[in-house]
Image (tube, rainbow, N blue to C red):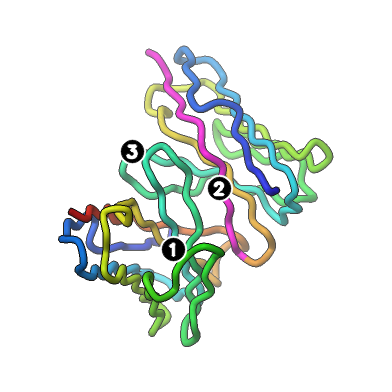
Amino acid sequence: SQKIEQNSEALNIQEGKTATLTCNYTNYSPAYLQWYRQDPGRGPVFLLLIRENEKEKRKERLKVTFDTTLKQSLFHITASQPADSATYLCALEDGANNLFFGTGTRLTVIP
Amino acid sequence: GAVVSQHPSWVICKSGTSVKIECRSLDFQATTMFWYRQFPKQSLMLMATSNEGSKATYEQGVEKDKFLINHASLTLSTLTVTSAHPEDSSFYICSAVDTGGVAGELFFGEGSRLTVL
């Protein structure tokens, strides 16, 4: 069966450190992989998109890698700040704009 | 970036009544919108794909007669939960594709929290 797993339900890190979140998938062949941020009671906000033929994408303090052999994406936030505390969702896009979401990782950055 | 607006942001209704949720793309046209449902501490689950001018495509297990979707214009899709029951209480979120934007990028509304008493 198809599955999207994010490494842990919750992750706590110290301010200034790099947060690394993992997204593993099985039985998908995504055209894109996306990462979203979701704050409590709000809709997801798009952060980064990486295509299947791209290995790495960066945007300010964010970096995403995509390994289609391992079927894994890593999402890094460098120099983390308390304002980065949120739930981060990975999502796979099947080439028809259908997105399938992982369960999310709740990140808490401790001052 | 593009803005998607949902209304209402929260609604409480009695069991057996119907509730309509609107999803609007404010500054772009969206031929395709998506409706998701999210239960507490769970991820978003795609319910249906709404296509302007045609019938919605429902995911397996989603009752099309219970969750009526209408996409009558390029900027508005509506989700009507008919004869709502307490188990329909959830966070409903829509998203839209900006066909003029980056391929694959979706814009989400703020969500609508439905509580059925």
Q: Residue at x 73, y 43 (%)?
A: A26
Q: What chain does badge 2 belong to?
A: A
Residue labelled with disc 1: B35
Q: Residue at x 41, y 27 (%)?
A: A85
Q: Residue at x 49, y 15 (%)?
A: A13
Question: Residue A98: image x %, image y %?
Answer: 59, 62
Of A22 and B57, the residue lying toward us: B57
**Helix or strand or loop: what does disc 2 sit on?**
strand
User: Do marks 3 and 2 share a chain?
Assistant: yes
Q: Amino acid at mark 2?
A: Phe
Q: Is residue A107 above or below residue B103?
A: above
Of A3 and A8, the residue lying toward us: A3
**Helix or strand or loop: what does disc 1 sit on?**
strand
Residue contact between numbered discs 1 and 3, judged by CB atoms under 8 Å: no
Q: Amino acid at mark 1?
A: Trp
Identify the magenta region.
A97-111
Q: Is residue B85 left or right of residue B55?
A: left
Q: Is residue B53 above or below residue B91?
A: below
| Earlier-in-chain disc, 3 versus 2 | 3
Which residue is most to the right? A69
Real-space Cα separation, disc 2 to disc 1, in angstroms: 13 Å
Which residue is most to the bottom? B53
Q: Residue at x 17, y 56 (%)?
A: B12
Q: Is residue A57 above or below residue B78?
A: above
Residue labelled with disc 2: A101
